[in-house]
Image: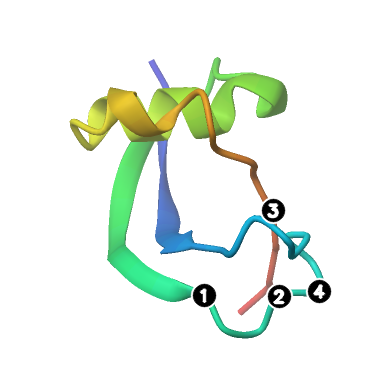
Amino acid sequence: MDMFPVRVLVETVRPQHCITCSHDGQPVVDTYAIVSGHTVLNQLVESVLNALGMPHLIAESRGKLTSFCV
């Protein structure tokens, strides 16, 4: 099975801010997770938070996906 690393940055964001307009998030976790190549993008946040042992954050979480090439 293909696996790939994903950089994960979990931050708290004030309720009155949207994810893309918030610039004052407080970091909770900054790490990497190994994700199955079969994980679909709309399940990525749930899969990563489960893998990091943080399933309690799933219900209130929103994802922001940023890609880069080296």
Q: Which residue is mark 4?
A: 21
Quadrant holding the C terminus: bottom right
Label 2 sits on what residue type?
A: Ser
The circle on residue 25 is: 1
Q: Nearer the viewer, mark 3 or mark 2?
A: 2
Q: Earlier in the sequence, mark 3 or mark 4?
A: 4
Query: Which residue type does callout 1 highlight?
Result: Gly
| Residue that appears at 78% across and 60% down | 18
| Amino acid type indicated by mark 4 | Cys
Q: Position of residue 5 (x, y in %)?
A: 39, 49
Q: CA distance from mark 1 to mark 2?
A: 7 Å
Instruction: Describe the element under mark 1 as helix, strand or loop.
Output: loop
* Residue 3 position in % (x across, y down): 39, 31
| 10 Å crowding of disc 1: few (<14), some (14-19), many (20+) | few
Amino acid marked by disc 3: Leu
Instruction: Kindly identify the residue that appears in the image at 64 percent across and 45 percent down.
Output: 63
Of 3 and 30, the residue lying toward us: 30
Residue marked by disc 2: 22
Residue of label 3: 65
- The reply, left or right, for residue 29 in relation to residue 48 is left
Residue 9 placement: quadrant: bottom left
Residue sitting at 59 percent across and 64 percent down?
14
Q: Do callouts 3 and 4 mark residues in contact (Cβ within 8 Å)? A: no
